[in-house]
């Protein structure tokens, strides 16, 4: 894929998420891998209105080499790329339902959401909770990095999800599946619910290995 096409795809998919209420002014960020580094939404930008020509370019060491200054949350993206070789794109959102779930007191920090649907199991699977740290705290970067080696999707406590994919479309589909599942999970609170059984989850993992 050419860099021009990748720039256009980042802006198109970001705008689509923004227009459907998955991100708000100056929240959420998106990135994609280049041969020589990464391309990322700029600091303070609204992902509904990104300019393909002004996306931030980082080299393989994470240094800013072109476009506007990268998002202050660039370390979340870099942690995923460095810990997961197959990562082609990363999306981070402050999407309402996922953030709400990240604030619940009684969730399992090893795996926050139950297997509600087959597509959630196939696109996200296990979702660990990263403990709360203030924005920019390097302990947050360290905690994400530790979990990223085993998980392509993590949920930051009282903050939001970070999801890596093999491509931009793959990362966007996975984070949207996560947000919709968080919404379903909240809708089902205090209702007698039938989740997928461990045997049904194991069957999906066999049929659709990640
Ligand atoms: Zn954030």
Image (tube, grey):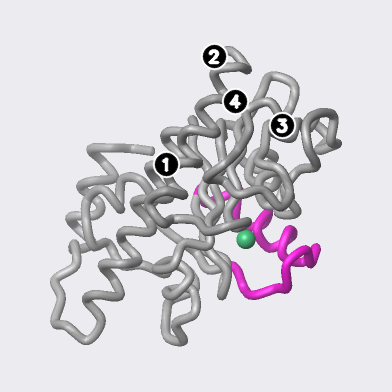
Q: Disc 2, disc 3: CB below 8 Å?
A: no
Residue with the mark numbered 2 = 1
Q: Which residues are magenta?
A: 130-152
- Whether the residues at callouts 2 and 1 have beta carbons within 8 Å, the answer is no
So how many labels did they put on this image? Answer: 4
Distance in Å between CA atoms under marks 2 and 1: 21 Å
The residue depicted at 75 percent of the width and 54 percent of the height is 72
**Which residue has dot 1 on it?**
16
Q: Position of residue 198 (x, y in %)?
A: 23, 62
Instruction: Please name the residue that numbered disc 3 is placed on.
Output: 54
Binning the other alpha carbons within 10 Å of mark 3 as few (below 14), some (14 to 19) or many (20 upward) gives some
Q: Sequence-wise, which precedes: disc 2 or disc 1?
A: 2
Secondary structure of residue under mark 2:
loop
Q: Residues within 10 Å of mark 2 (few under 14, many from 20)?
A: few
Tag 4 residue: 7
Assign a secondary structure to mark 4.
helix
């Amino acid at each position: 894929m050419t860099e021009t096409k990748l720039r256009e795809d980042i802006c198109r998919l970001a705008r689509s998420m923004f227009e459907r209420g998955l991100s708000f002014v100056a929240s959420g960020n998106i990135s994609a891998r280049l041969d020589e580094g990464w391309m990322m939404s700029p600091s303070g930008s609204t992902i509904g209105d990104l300019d393909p020509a002004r996306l931030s370019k980082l080299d393989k060491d994470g240094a800013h080499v072109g476009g506007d200054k990268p998002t202050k949350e660039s370390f979340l993206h870099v942690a995923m790329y460095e810990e997961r070789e197959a990562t082609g794109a990363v999306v981070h959102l402050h999407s309402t339902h996922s953030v709400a779930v990240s604030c619940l007191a009684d969730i399992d920090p090893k795996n926050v959401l139950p297997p509600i649907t087959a597509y959630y199991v196939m696109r996200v699977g296990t979702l660990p909770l990263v403990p709360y740290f203030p924005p920019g705290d390097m302990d947050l970067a360290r905690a994400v990095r530790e979990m990223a080696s085993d998980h392509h999707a993590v949920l930051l406590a009282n903050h939001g999800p970070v999801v890596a994919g093999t491509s931009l479309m793959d990362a966007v589909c996975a984070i949207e599946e996560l947000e919709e599942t968080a919404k379903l999970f909240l809708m089902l609170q205090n209702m007698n619910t039938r989740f997928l059984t461990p045997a049904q989850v194991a069957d999906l993992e066999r049929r659709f290995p990640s």
